[in-house]
Each structure stands twice: as structure tokens, then as C-alpha cells.
């Protein structure tokens, strides 16, 4: 039984795409067409159309063409690839949120007659101490000593977040990031009690947000961040 072939125009109408897009995907090796003797237009079998649909779903999730090609060639783990892509998107959103927050804080300082270029002397000593504590916390985090990190938490935070919950959150956050590469920068903005530590991993960055109180770290959040120079 001869397999029915669909002309490229039919496929484009069926899938709501363009011939230019299909040619591009074929050029990149992530879809195929069927050669027809004496034919000049691309044609596709139902199996090939199913492959195109899969590619279009992955592209709708923001998956780069190169990553799709890698998944196909290596029969990679689709769940892991989607997990990594989600982390990358979260990282880009985090970067924008950080910029908005810093801009808002700078604007508020200016509107109150302050100088965004001058350090606030009465906060410098406290800020230095907290930066040193954040440094020690980060050293322990990178060494895998989560018990040591947990010791920095206030009694209130430990009560609200048992150690096992903290360890689970760390493990889940580090799942898609790959191997550790280097420390990044620290940024604190204009809020002295909040310190961020940025870590560069093989696939993206991780930030640790530490909120300090008088008796230690009263809040901690983990998230993803971009590490490229901007």
C-alpha cells in the first residue's frame, strides 16, 4: 500500500506554519521531507508530519533549534530538557525583576533627596558584617555542608522550615544547573538587610537571597539568574 504524501502547502495549512519555517527546520536537520522523482516541491509522509508537530510543540515551549537537534541525535531526556528550559526562563525573569527593583529603590532615594552614589555611613559596618556572614554561608553551601548553612538561620526560620525541607529545596534547585563553574557577583541594592550571592553553574546561574535580622538569617530563597555580562 502506497503511503500518502502531503504537499508542503497542505502541511503548512494543516499546521498553521510557513514553508520558510519548514525549510529552515529541514536545513537544521530536525525534520525531513520525502523526495519525489521529478518533483520540485517538498512532500511529507504522515510520520514526517508527526515529527513536525513534535518540533512545533517544543518550539512553542521556547526550546532552541540546536537543543531540539541535540535531543534527537542523542535521544536525550525530554523531561530534563524542559526542566532546564524552565529554569532559564525563570532566570531571565529574575534578572528583569532585579533591575526593576533596583531602579525603583534608586528612584525612591532620589525623590527623598538622597544620593544614590554615596554609601550610607551608618549602615556600612552592619553591611560589612552581613557580607562576611553571607560569604561563609556560601562557602558552606558550595561545600555541600547544608547543616552548617542551617546553623545560620534564626530559631524562627528553623521552626518554619525544617532542615529536611531546606535540603530538598536545595536539591530541587540544583537539579537542572549542571556543574559548578565559579562564584559570581554579589548585589545588595539599597536594602542593607538583603544580600544576594550569585553562583555560576555549567548551564545557568543560581542566586541565594539572604534576609538578615538581628539574630541571624531570618529568610532564605533560592532561584535562577542569568550570569552573562550585560
Image (tube, helix red, strand yellow):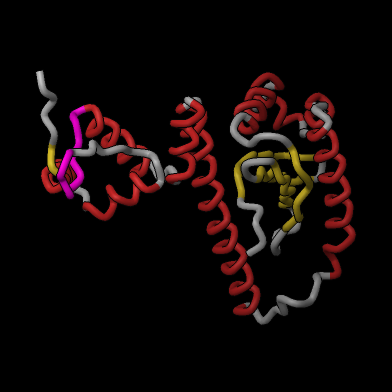
Where is 184 relative to 157, above or below? below
Asked if the stretch drawn in magenta spans residue 45, the answer is yes
Q: Splitting the image into 4 quarters, where does residue 45 fall? A: top left
Where is 188 relative to 142, above or below? below
Left or right of 190: which side holds 72? Answer: left
What's the residue at 21%, 49% (across, down)? 17
What's the residue at 53%, 52% (across, down)? 92
Quadrant location of the C terminus in the rendered image = bottom right
State the image coordinates of residue 200 (x, y, percent, origin top left).
Answer: 71, 46
State the image coordinates of residue 150 (x, y, percent, origin top left).
Answer: 78, 29
- Number of disc labels: 0
Q: Nearer the viewer, residue 85 or 104?
A: 85
Quadrant location of the N terminus in the rendered image = top left
What's the residue at 68%, 22% (across, down)? 162
Q: Residue furthest bottom?
A: 113
State the image coordinates of residue 139 (x, y, percent, origin top left).
Answer: 85, 38
Q: Nearer the viewer, residue 224 or 41?
A: 41
Q: Nearer the viewer, residue 147 or 129?
A: 147
Q: Nearer the viewer, residue 213 or 99?
A: 99
Where is 122 relative to 51, above or below? below
Left or right of 11: which side holds 83? Answer: right
Q: Specify the principal SS of the magenta part.
A: loop
Q: Splitting the image into 4 quarters, where does residue 78 fall? A: top left
Left or right of 1: which side holds 75? Answer: right
Left or right of 124: which side holds 65? Answer: left
Residue extent of the magenta highlight: 37-46
What's the residue at 76%, 46% (across, down)? 212
State the image coordinates of residue 61 (x, y, percent, origin top left).
Answer: 38, 41
Asked if the stretch drawn in magenta spans residue 130, the answer is no
Amino acid at each position: 500500500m502506497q503511503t500518502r504524501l502531503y504537499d508542503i502547502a497542505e502541511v503548512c495549512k494543516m499546521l498553521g506554519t510557513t514553508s520558510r519555517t519548514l525549510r529552515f527546520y529541514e536545513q537544521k536537520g530536525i525534520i525531513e521531507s520525502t523526495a519525489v522523482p521529478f518533483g520540485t516541491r517538498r512532500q511529507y509522509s504522515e510520520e514526517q508530519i508527526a515529527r513536525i508537530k513534535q518540533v512545533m510543540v517544543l518550539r512553542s515551549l521556547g526550546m532552541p533549534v540546536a537543543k531540539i537537534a541535540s535531543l534527537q541525535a542523542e535521544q536525550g531526556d525530554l523531561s530534563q530538557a524542559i526542566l532546564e528550559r524552565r529554569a532559564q526562563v525563570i532566570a531571565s525573569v529574575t534578572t528583569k525583576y532585579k533591575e526593576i527593583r533596583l531602579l525603583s529603590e534608586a528612584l525612591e532615594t532620589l525623590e527623598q533627596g538622597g544620593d544614590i552614589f554615596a554609601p550610607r555611613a551608618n549602615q556600612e559596618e552592619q553591611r560589612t558584617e552581613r557580607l562576611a556572614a553571607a560569604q561563609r554561608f556560601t562557602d558552606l553551601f558550595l561545600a555541600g555542608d547544608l547543616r552548617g548553612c542551617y546553623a545560620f538561620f534564626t530559631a524562627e526560620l528553623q521552626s518554619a522550615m525544617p532542615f529536611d525541607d531546606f535540603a530538598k529545596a536545595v536539591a530541587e534547585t540544583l537539579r537542572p544547573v549542571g556543574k559548578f563553574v565559579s562564584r559570581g557577583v554579589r548585589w545588595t541594592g539599597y536594602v542593607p538587610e538583603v544580600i544576594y550571592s550569585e553562583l555560576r553553574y555549567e548551564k545557568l546561574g543560581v542566586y541565594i537571597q539572604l534576609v538578615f535580622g538581628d539574630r541571624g538569617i531570618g529568610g532564605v530563597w533560592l532561584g535562577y539568574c542569568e550570569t552573562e555580562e550585560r
